[in-house]
Image (cartoon, rainbow, N blue to C red):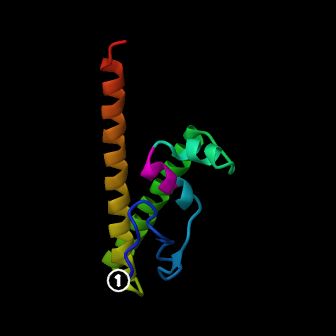
Amino acid sequence: MIIPPIGGLGSHVSGAAEGLTQAPTAGHAEAAAVGQGAGGAEAGEATGGASSSFGTELTEAISSLESSQQSAAGASQALASGTVSDPESAVTTVEDAALEMQLAAQIRAKATEAAQTIFQTQV
């Protein structure tokens, strides 16, 4: 079993209707860029790649988080009802969604702490 890095989280399970087969979702690179630091948009501009605003990156990361939470809810329902064909895949989906939520909470806490530090800085 391959464990993906926390920032990228690999591919997600699409849902119980497809027999819980893994399918990549859009926005993993953006979610990883936001998860690895607030400099994701600046790094794209510095390397000459396609740049997008931090707000766009954040919106895509939140969208990816929401879709993973929805797929985890579907997988857990299928697991509870016994209609899942691959229980290991369902459990992996739920654990991936839990890890993504923990990562998002940690990023939010660090961002809040950084903003409070900036506001308390005397000029």
- Which residues fall within the magenta stretch? 31-37
Q: Residues within 10 Å of mark 1 (few under 14, many from 20)?
A: few
Residue at 55%, 40% (x, y): give it.
54
Q: Which residue sits furthest top?
A: 123
Which of these two is toward me, 12 or 79? 12
Pinpoint residue 12: horizontal percent, then vertical percent: 48, 70
Which of these two is toward me, 87 or 40? 40
Residue at 38%, 63% (x, y): give it.
6
Residue highlighted by disc 1: 88
- Regarding residue 77, the answer to whether it shows in the image is no
Pinpoint residue 89: horizontal percent, then vertical percent: 39, 80
Look at the magenta stretch and give its main secondary structure: helix
**What element does badge 1 sit on?**
helix
- Regarding residue 17, the answer to whether it shows in the image is yes
Tag count: 1
Residue at 37%, 12% (x, y): give it.
123
Within the magenta stretch, is there residue 51? Answer: no
Whether 50 is drawn above or below 98: the answer is: above
Pinpoint residue 49: horizontal percent, then vertical percent: 68, 51
Q: Quadrant of residue 107?
A: top left
Q: Quadrant of residue 91?
A: bottom left
Pinpoint residue 113: horizontal percent, then vertical percent: 30, 33
Whether 19 is drawn above or below 112: the answer is: below
Which of these two is toward me, 68 or 55? 55
- Quadrant of the image containing the N terminus: bottom left
Looking at the rendered structure, the kind of residue marked 1 is: Glu
